[in-house]
Amino acid sequence: MKVETIFFNENEGTGLTTYLLDSSNEMANALVRPAVLIFPGGGYMMCSDREAEPIAMAYAAEGYHAFVLRYSVGKTATWEEAFADANHAMKMIDDNSESWGIDTERLAVVGFSAGGHLACSLATMGEIRPGAAVLGYPCILAEMGNLLNKAVPGLDQQVDEKTPPVFVFTTFDDQLVPVRNTTALLQALEKGGVPFEAHVFYSGVHGLSLAKSHTSSGFSGNVSHNVAKWFELSVAFLKEIFGDFQADRSFHDFPVDNSDGPYGLDHSLGSLWENQHCRQVLLNYLPMLDDEKVRNQASGVSVRTIISYAEELLTKEQTAMLEHELRQVRRS
Amino acid sequence: MKVETIFFNENEGTGLTTYLLDSSNEMANALVRPAVLIFPGGGYMMCSDREAEPIAMAYAAEGYHAFVLRYSVGKTATWEEAFADANHAMKMIDDNSESWGIDTERLAVVGFSAGGHLACSLATMGEIRPGAAVLGYPCILAEMGNLLNKAVPGLDQQVDEKTPPVFVFTTFDDQLVPVRNTTALLQALEKGGVPFEAHVFYSGVHGLSLAKSHTSSGFSGNVSHNVAKWFELSVAFLKEIFGDFQADRSFHDFPVDNSDGPYGLDHSLGSLWENQHCRQVLLNYLPMLDDEKVRNQASGVSVRTIISYAEELLTKEQTAMLEHELRQVRRS
Amino acid sequence: MKVETIFFNENEGTGLTTYLLDSSNEMANALVRPAVLIFPGGGYMMCSDREAEPIAMAYAAEGYHAFVLRYSVGKTATWEEAFADANHAMKMIDDNSESWGIDTERLAVVGFSAGGHLACSLATMGEIRPGAAVLGYPCILAEMGNLLNKAVPGLDQQVDEKTPPVFVFTTFDDQLVPVRNTTALLQALEKGGVPFEAHVFYSGVHGLSLAKSHTSSGFSGNVSHNVAKWFELSVAFLKEIFGDFQADRSFHDFPVDNSDGPYGLDHSLGSLWENQHCRQVLLNYLPMLDDEKVRNQASGVSVRTIISYAEELLTKEQTAMLEHELRQVRRS
Amino acid sequence: MKVETIFFNENEGTGLTTYLLDSSNEMANALVRPAVLIFPGGGYMMCSDREAEPIAMAYAAEGYHAFVLRYSVGKTATWEEAFADANHAMKMIDDNSESWGIDTERLAVVGFSAGGHLACSLATMGEIRPGAAVLGYPCILAEMGNLLNKAVPGLDQQVDEKTPPVFVFTTFDDQLVPVRNTTALLQALEKGGVPFEAHVFYSGVHGLSLAKSHTSSGFSGNVSHNVAKWFELSVAFLKEIFGDFQADRSFHDFPVDNSDGPYGLDHSLGSLWENQHCRQVLLNYLPMLDDEKVRNQASGVSVRTIISYAEELLTKEQTAMLEHELRQVRRS
C-alpha cells in the first residue's frame, strides 16, 4: 500500500492522502480497482480523524483504493473554499488514474456530516461528477448554515440529471443534524429520478463513523451493532452500481480423469502417471515427482492445482508448454 | 498509516512490512493497539500476495496494527531458515512495541497453509510466543514435508503448556492440505488443555484467503460467502482473548434540564440561556451565541454536545473552566 | 404451537389465524410474549400466501406470537370492509391477550404492499393502535387507488400524534408501487414527529416477501441476499421499541470454591465432597453420587449446574432445601 | 401449519410432534420440502423444551418441515428404548412422506447434548439413515454414560460408510460435555471418510440452544451473539448437502418493448396500447383497462407483472390464452 499526502496548503493542513493498494499478478482481477474519496466531518470547523483513516481502511479491506481529503475548514474558511478543494481532489485523481490503477468510472465520494454535505456538493455540482455518493448523517439543508456558522447551499435544491446514484444513512434521533436533512434529500432524489438507497436507523447519536469500538473514542454511545451494518450495505450498493470484481473463471479442482479427450493439466497426477509418456513429460518439467513419497501425497490432485500451489516451480510459458506436450500424448 | 518494509535480506525479498495505523487524540481508546503478524502461504516456495496485504487490510479495518512477514522460501530454503525469520520478526515487533504503539500482550500470529505452519511453529516453539494464533487451512503434520519438498516438524507433536489459544479454519474437501492436519491439531490442543476455536467448513478449495471477490484472482471457486465468515469469527475470537477496545464512557446526549443539581455542560443551551448569569458565562466562552439564529438552531442540544461537535471552539482547559463557572451559578 | 383459524366470514375466507408458541417453565422469560399481526399483500384483490405463514414463521423463530389476518378482498370489497376486519382482529387479540399469553403493549402490525396500506391504516387510524408498525413496500398514497381499483385513503395525510413508531422497507426500483409512497410517508412522519426506521434498497422487484429461496416461488428475481436483511433489521427495531426478552440473570458456571462464605450450590462437587457434612447432605438428595465414577465425571462442576442439567432429579423445593442445608455446614 | 402430536406412549409423554408448513401454489418450488427431525437434550433424563419447539420454529422459518421427538427418558429408561423411539420416528416420517409433502432424501436429524447422542446414533446405526445430521454440543463418548447414569454406545466407534454428512457445533469450555466428545467424533469421521462441517466456539456454556434471548430462560450466559451463528451455518450446510429451494426461473420485470419479436406479456401496457389490435385483446381479458387512470398508473409496467400482482384477475388458462392472442398480433 502506498500512503502519501499531497498537500494543497501545508500551513492549513489541507491535502489529499492516498491509500493505494499494491498490485499483484496473483490478483489478476484487481489490477485496476474502484476507489473512494472520503470527506471526514467536523462542522466545516475541523476534519475528524474518526471519519478519515478508519473509513479508508474499511474500503481498502474490500479491495478499493481510498483517498482522504482534508479540506479548508475553520471560522474564516468558506464553503466555496472547501468545494474548490473537493473539485481539485477529483481532478487530481482523474489526472493520475492510470498510474494509480483506478477505474474513474467507479470512483465514489464518501462523506460524513459536513463532509457529507461536501460529498453531496460534488455529486450535484462538481466539475467532475463521481460515479456514486455515500453519505453518512449528512448536512443537506441551507438552514444548517446556522449551526455551521457559514453559508452553505441547500443541496436538496441542487439535484440534477447528472447526479449519480446516492446511498445515505443516518439515525432518526440524531440531535445535531436533524433527520429532515435526509428526508428532504430523498424527496428531491425521488422527484429528480435519481436512484438511491437509504437507511435511517431508529436510534443512534450523531457522528457514529463505523459505529464500532475502535472508532468510538471510548464512548459506549458511539458503538452500535445495528447501525454498523451501514458499511456492508454501502459495499453492496457500490457493487450494484459499479459491478463486483470479476470472478467468473473456473478451475477444475477435481481431475477430469474419466474424460475421453486429450491429456492435460486437469488430470490427476495419479492418472497421468499411469501413462509412461505423460510420466516422461512430467518429469522433464517437475523432476521432484521422481520421489515416490511426493507423488503419493499428490496423486489425487490435478497437475494444474499442484502447479498453482507453488508458482515458482514453473513460469507461465513453461506451464503452457507442459500442457501442450501432455495434449500430444496419445491415449493408450 | 505508516507502511514500510524492513528487509531482512533484500536479495531474497525477505523482510517485515509494517501497516501501522495513525494515532489520534480523537480515538483516545486506540492510542495503543493490538496487532497481527501475518504469514502468507505458498508451500514454503513463495509468499502469496493474496494472503498478504489483503489480510493486513482486513485486520487494519478492525483497528489492529498489522505486519506481513515475507520469510525464506524456495527450493533450497529450509524450514529452519523460515522459522528464524519468524522469530526475528517477533523480536523486532517486541523491541519496537512502544514506538509503534503496540500492546505486545495482544499480538496474534495469522498464517495460511504453509504460512499457517510457520505461525503455528511460533505458537508452539517460538522464542517469543504470540498471545494467540489464527491459522487458515494450515499444514500441521510432518508428512506434509513430502508435498512441501522439505523437512518440517509435525506441530501436533509440539503443543505445550505455553501454547496460546488457537483459532483454526479450513474446509473438509481441501484437496491439497487434507483436513486431517486440522483434526490432528485439535486432538493435540484438546489433550494439551490449550483453548481453541475451530471452523471446518463443508466445502471450499484450498487457498481461499478472504474468500471474497477481490482476493479471488478472478476464479469463482475462490469466492465463498459461507467460508468468508471465518474473518469476522476470527475477530470475535481475538476480542475474547485480548478484550475489545474499551468503550464504556458515557455521554449525556439528552440535556439534564430537570435536575435539581448545579448547572453544567449537560444542560441544554435553551435552559441555560434562561438564566442571565449562565447566559453571561456562555457568551464569554462562545461569543457566537450572541446570534439568535445560532441559538435557536441549538437550543435543545446540550452545551457539551455543541462543544464536542466543533472542537476548535474551545481547548480542553477552556471547556473545564466553562463547566466550572457554570457550576458556580446559583439556581434562581 | 397452537395454530387455529377463527373465521370472520368462512365463505369469503376472511379470518384470523393464530400461531401461538407453547409456554414452558424452562423458558421463564417468555411466559408472556410480544406478538405480530400480519397483513399479506395482494392489491386488495387477494391475500398472498407468500406474505402470510412464512412471515409468521420468521417472527415465531424470534420468540414472537404471530397472527395472520385474511381480510376482505376482491373486486367488490371496499377498503372500509378490509379496515373493519383489521380493527376486529386487533380487538380479538386484545380481548384474548391474557389467555394467549400476549403483552398487548408489545403488539406490532406487519404488512406488505396493500397489506402494508392496511397495517398503516391501523397505525394511523385504528380503533386500537398497535405499538409499532412494520411496512414492506407499502401502498401509502391515495393515487394508488387507481391501481388497486378502489378508493383508499392517502395515509401520508393521516399521520397523527397517536401513530406509533414505524419501520418501512422497500426498493427504489419497485415498478408497481413507486418509491414515492415511501418517501411521502417518511416526510409525513418526520413532520409529525413520529419516530421511524426506513430502509430503501437500491434494487429489487415488488413483492419480495422474505427475499429468500423458499418464498421465491422459483423466481430468481424474488431472491435477494441484500434485501433479505430487512427481516433482522425489523427484529432489531422491534427490540428497540418493545425491549428484548429479559436475560439478565447470572449463573455461576465456575464454582466459587475459594470463597470464604458459606457452602452452597455454586461450589464444585469436588470441593463440597471434601467436607464430610456436605458429603452427607449431598448423598441425602443425590444418592447417585455414591458412585465414584459419577462423582469423578462431575467433580469440577458446580452442584447447581449438575442439578440444572437433569431437572427431574430434584424439585424446586428440594433444591432450595439442599441449598439451605449446605449453607448450615460450618467450614472446617 | 399443521401441528399435531402422535403419541408413542401417552403416559410417558413420548411421541412425535409435527410442524408441517402449509402448501400453496403461490410457492410452487416448495410443494415438497426438506425436513428436520429434532431431538431435544436433557441428559436422557428429560426432553428440554428449550431445544424443542424453538428449534422447530427456526428451521420452519427457513422453509423446512420440522418434527420434534420426545423419546424415552428417566432413571429407568435405557438408551435402547430411546433409540427404538428414534427409529420408530424415522419410520413414521418415511411412511407418511407423501401425504406430509416431505422429500425423504432431504431429511436431517438435529440433536442437542444427549439428544445429539441420539441423533448421531441414528446417523451411524439407524435402521433408516437420515440424509444429514446436525449435532449441538453432543455427547459422543461411551464414558458419558457415567454422567448420564446409563450405558450408552460410544459413537466415535460406530462411524461407518453409510454415515451421512455431519454438522457439529460446540464450545471449547463446555463444562458438562467436554469438547473431547467433539474432537473424537471429528477424528472418527475423518478416518471414515465421512464429510463434515464443525464449529467449536471458544467460549459459551453447555446447553445454549439458539443462544438467543428468547431461549435463554433469562440467563445472560445463555445468550451469545457469536455462538448464535451456528444456526445460519447449519442452514448453509444443509443447503450444500440437500440443495436449495429451486429459484432459477426468470421474469421480465422490465418490458421488452424494443424487441423485434412478437408481442407478448412482457411488453409494457403502454406500448401494447399503441397497437389497436393489442388494445382490443387486452380489453377482452382486462376490462378495467378501459379506465384511463388505471392505464396511466401501470403504463410502464409489463402486462405479466400486472397480472402476477392480482392473480384473481385471470386464471392460468386465461393468462396463457391472452399471451397466445397477443403473439398473433402483427407488428404494424
Image (cartoon, coloured by chain):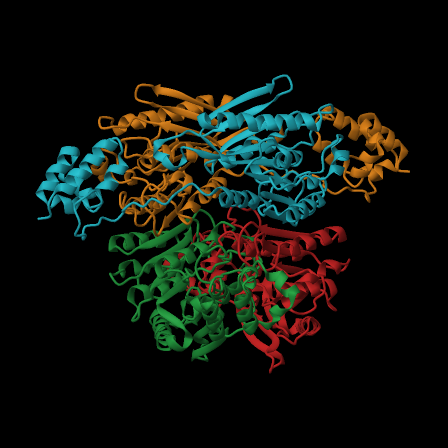
Chain colours: A cyan, B orange, C red, D green
Name the one closer to the observer, C63 or D46.
C63
**Res A194 seen here:** yes
**Residue nearer the viewer, A42 or C215:** C215
Asked whether A94 or A271 is in front, the reply is A94
The quadrant holding residue A308 is top left
Q: Is residue A251 left or right of residue D223?
A: left
Q: Residue at x 88, y 34 (%)?
A: B330
x and y percent of residue A68 in the render? 56, 29
The quadrant holding residue D110 is: bottom left
Q: Nearer the viewer, residue C132 or C146?
A: C146
Residue B303 is situated, as x and y percent measured from the top left of the image, at 77, 35
Give percent across and percent down for residue B67: 43, 29
Quadrant assignment for the C terminus of chain B = top right
Image vertical order of residue C202 relative to residue D280, above or below: above
Q: Residue at x 45, y 80 (%)?
A: D10
**Name of the residue lying farthest toward the top:** A11
Q: Residue A227: percent from the left, percent from the top?
A: 60, 45
Q: Is residue D312 visible?
A: no
| Residue pictured at 56% horizontal, 29% vertical | A90
> In the image, is D281 to the left or to the right of A321?
right
Q: How many marks?
A: 0
Q: Vertical placement of C326 versus B15: above or below?
A: below
